[in-house]
Amino acid sequence: MADIIIQMYGSGTGGTEDALANIDIPEDGTIRGVDWSVHADLDADTENFRTELSFIATNQLATNDSRGIISRVGAQASGTPGFQAVSVQKYVPMNIQVAGGERLYLNHIGSAGLAVDIACLIHFEPRGGVQRRSARRR
């Protein structure tokens, strides 16, 4: 069966933004991959952001042994202040079984005043369809 692409989107302005976006898994199936596309305006020294896709509604970015994070991205500016547009593109293949109704969250932490645009595309393969019944019906 073909993958369904589910986009999660959020824009951040800095600080802690838990549950910036959330979705419910539409039906039982498998997450086959996560495709990140993040654009940020890191225009000051040490400005940074970290974003995660998670089963948990509060960020686990600085938590040891967290089992809720599915994938994460981040970036930091270093050097002379000025306009530093940063783009992060990342694809992570995976094979995570999920049940319909499970909720996924985008959690984000960024420097104060940071402008960031986050798109996380989830490649989802639904289990779907009815299993073939006995051949006796032919």
Image (cartoon, helix red, strand yellow):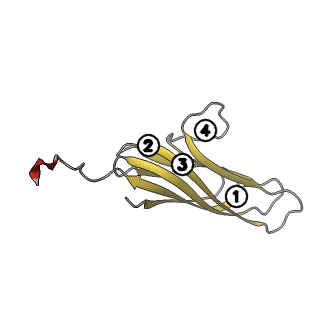
The residue most toward the top is 65
C-alpha gap between disc 4 and disc 2 = 21 Å
Q: Which numbered mark, 4 or 2, is in the foreground of this view?
A: 2
Q: Which mark identifies residue 100?
A: none
Dot 3 alpha-carbon crowd within 10 angstroms: few under 14, some 14 to 19, many 20 or more = some
> Hey, what amino acid is under mark 2?
Gln
Looking at the image, is mark 4 or mark 1 nearer the viewer?
Answer: 4
N-terminal of the two: label 4 or label 1?
Answer: 4
Q: Residues within 10 Å of mark 4 (few under 14, many from 20)?
A: many
Query: Of label 1 and label 2, which has the lower sequence position?
Result: 2
Residue 97 disc label: 2
Where residue 6 sits, quadrant-wise, is: bottom left
| In contact (CB < 8 Å): disc 4 and disc 3 | no
Cα separation between marks 1 and 2: 37 Å
Q: Amino acid at mark 4?
A: Gln
| Towards the viewer: 41 or 93 | 93
- The percent position of residue 133, horizontal first and vertical second, equals 18, 47
Q: Earlier in the sequence, mark 1 or mark 3?
A: 3
**Mark number displayed over residue 60:** 4
User: What residue appears at the point 35 percent right and 45 percent down from the top-left corner?
Assistant: 101
Q: What distance separates the C-alpha of mark 4 from that of mark 1? A: 22 Å
Q: Is residue 60 above or below residue 10?
A: above
Residue pointed to by mark 1: 113
Give the x, y percent position of residue 88. 68, 61
Write down the residue under mark 3: 94
Amino acid tagged 3: Met
Contact, CB < 8 Å: mark 1 with mark 2? no
Give left or right: position of 98 versus 63. Answer: left
Question: Circle 1 — which element?
Answer: loop
Residue 128: x and y in percent read 31, 52
Q: Are marks 4 and 2 in contact (CB under 8 Å)?
A: no
The percent coordinates of residue 97 (x first, y second) are: 43, 43
